[in-house]
Image (tube, rainbow, N blue to C red):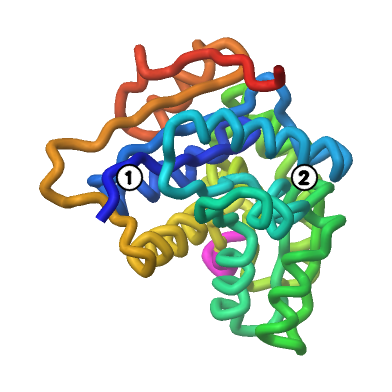
Amino acid sequence: MDNRPIGVFDSGLGGLTAVRELMDLLPNESIVYLGDTGRVPYGTRSKETILKYARQDINFLNTFDLKAILIACGTITTNGLDMIQKEYPLPILGVAEPAARAAAAATRNGRIGLIATQASIRSGLYERIIRAESPQTEIFSVPCPLFVSLVEAGHYAKGDPMVKLAAEEYLTSLQEQKIDTLILGCTHYPLLSDAIEDFFGPAVTLINSGAQGALTFREMLAQKDLLADPQQVSATYQYYVTDRTEQFSRLAAVFLGRPVSGLVEQVVIDQ
């Protein structure tokens, strides 16, 4: 057993979709979360910039003597997870492979939709993983750059007119392709699940990349005997952002269903 905290990071709020799952799956685990809100979004950046940001994120988290890190960011996972895993000695997992495998198992008609950032789709990683599992499966990919900005600004309710307009713009072509499974390939997107489900209806199964990543992360901790002692008094949660704390604190408290006031600190990580 290992009572050291786990680290989770993303470009902003999106990684909280994984944190919420981890809190439910691993209630004894302490978590240090970093949201790089000062540089969100990552999905429009070059691979070199994405990797630079990822290394700075990990270097900051490593000051906490972590036992493992979950990269709760589809963009980083698809553009450099293998390289990052070679550079750092502690276990580091991403969210893309678990989501892709879950989608391959879930589809009934072999037609899977993928919505993600431009950088994630450009990498082709989701398609490679799915086709390795099921060569006959067709994948239809659509980048949704505005979704991240909407979530970070607090627009995610299905009745929000801006969300509805963006959903119609991005998702109509996938609806026309008669997909039956949709990968939410950016961890911001599950915050828009209600609006996306409202658009597609019950016939389309949504694959939450943050949730799938959290499940795989739990399995990894168990396999490596890194789970926290269930007899420890209580888990602790710390949140760090690279821009102002107010917006993050307000939205994080709503989404996580628990107060985060006083637990969020602004930091500088790019020095």
- For residue 252, say whether it is visible: yes
Q: Which residues are magenta?
A: 200-205
Locate the N terminus and report the quarter of the image it occupies. bottom left
Residue 108, quarter of picture: bottom right
Residue 93: image tag: none
Q: Is residue 146 above or below residue 175?
A: above
Amino acid type, callout 2? Cys
Residue in the picture at 69% in, 86% down: 134
Q: Tell me which corner region of the image, top left, top right, bottom left or bottom right, holds residue 142.
A: bottom right
Please name whichever residue, 57 or 116, is drawn nearer the observer in this view of the structure.
57
271 or 254: nearer the viewer: 271
Image quarter of the C terminus? top right
Secondary element at tag 2: loop
Q: What residue is disc 1 on?
A: 23
Classify 10 Å Cα crowding around label 1: few (below 14), some (14-19), many (20 and above).
some
The foreground one among 75 and 50 is: 50
Q: Position of residue 30 (x, y in %)?
A: 32, 38
Does residue 85 sit above or below 182 in this rendering?
above
- Could you tell me if the residues under marks 2 and 1 are in contact, i.e. CB atoms within 8 Å? no
Query: Residue 119 appears at what percent x and percent y?
Result: 82, 48
Predominant SS along the magenta part: loop
The kind of secondary structure element at disc 1 is helix
Task: Please report whichever mark, 2 or 1, sits nearer to the chain's N-terminal start.
Answer: 1
User: Which of the 4 image quadrants contains residue 254?
Assistant: top left
Which residue has dot 2 on it? 144
Q: Residue at x 57, y 28 (%)?
A: 60
Marks 2/1: CA distance? 28 Å
- Amino acid on which disc 1 is placed: Met
Is 106 left, or right, of 125 in this rendering? left
